[in-house]
Image (tube, rainbow, N blue to C red):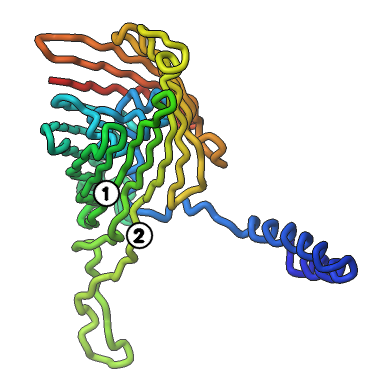
Amino acid sequence: MNLTAIRNKLKTAGRCGLLTGLLFLLAAVPQSLQAQTVSGVGTTAASFLKIGVGARALGMGEAYTTQATDVTALYWNPGALDRIDNIQMVFNHFDYLADIYFEYFGAAVPIQNLGTFGISFSYLGMPDMERTTVMSPDGNGEMVSAHSYAVNVGFARALTDRFAIGGNVKYVGESIWHAQATGFAFDVGLLYRALFRNVKIGMSITNFGTDMSMQGRDMLIQHDISEQYAGNNENINAYLDTDGFPMPVLFRVGLSANIGRDFFNLEKYDWIVAVDAVHPNDNREYLNVGTEIDVWNALALRTGYRQLFLKDREGGFTFGFGVRFNILNTVLNLDYANVDYGRLDHHNKFSLLFSF
């Protein structure tokens, strides 16, 4: 709705009375503003920080803010890290889009009467490609690489038997050819187990940190600082001043319940239902929903839907399973997930989690 239409509504409102006029105005303004809103997609750096980790979480549609009671809490909700009872490690390999691959490693160590410490490393890479130029459209023999990485250290502590808080600090870097960008980011998370049916409520804010801008020898150019004077040096070294971009901040609020044990009193079956509301700084809000059925603490079946109600999303449906083995006093969790990316096809995700 344009300004002329709003002005006409106000004239009509003057004839109908003050209260009616306010109703006309409130109905008109949101429509005019809605046409001007943008999603913010593509306005942040280090977008790889939004790639979810752990095949269990992905199989449940990324509705994992309250269910991350393992080492992957370092990514989803550091407040849940304190729910770990023993040393854990996770190895994660994803064949991502267009020959891009993603690696993730995390480890957590609980210390009695102190809390739980964790560390993780994530890496997004691609095969080297040959550089092309206007003069060499088929390649000039020089290889170009690009990658992103993050090193994360976290800590969580239970303040009561039902409430825990945690946080992370991470160093983030991205590189393409001879240019690099680095920055620091912080995460904070909370996990609360309610008195009613042990319902879990969680919250996390991740990737809140410094802006990132590209620096390096690729920014070096030759510039003539005094073009109006003849005979001066027209090849003065100068560096391009690149813009800084914020990191992809994610605010998550989650709710989950084990309806198998806490609602239906099924002692041998865990039936978990979870939902997360997500507010990113580079897109519109959406919901993640998921469920998991665990039989005899040995086999788990999962399904979910990610980015529900998000406009222009690709795919959304997920499913997967997990099996648990006990080998030489070590618990091994092998998890698999299949994630639908719409026009970008389905992708298989695997992860291994060890508990000592």
Q: Quadrant of residue 238?
A: bottom left
Q: Under tag 2, what secondary structure?
A: loop
Q: Residue at x 23, y 55 (%)?
A: 184
* Tag 2: amino acid: Phe
Q: Position of residue 265 (x, y in %)?
A: 42, 11
Q: Nearer the viewer, mark 2 or mark 1?
A: 2
Disc 1: CA contacts within 10 A as few (<14), some (14-19) or many (>=20): some
In the picture of the structure, the residue carrying the numbered disc 1 is 131
Q: Residue at x 11, y 33 (%)?
A: 111
Q: Earlier in the sequence, mark 2 or mark 1?
A: 1
Q: Quadrant of residue 16?
A: bottom right
Disc 2: CA contacts within 10 A as few (<14), some (14-19) or many (>=20): some
| Residue 346 visible in this rendered orientation of the protein | no
* Tag 1: amino acid: Arg
Check the image and name the residue furthest to the right. 15
Check the image and name the residue furthest to the bottom. 229
Q: Which mark is residue 245?
A: 2
With 289 as the anchor, is 82 left or right in this view? Answer: left
Q: Residue at x 23, y 41 (%)?
A: 128
Q: Position of residue 74 (x, y in %)?
A: 25, 37
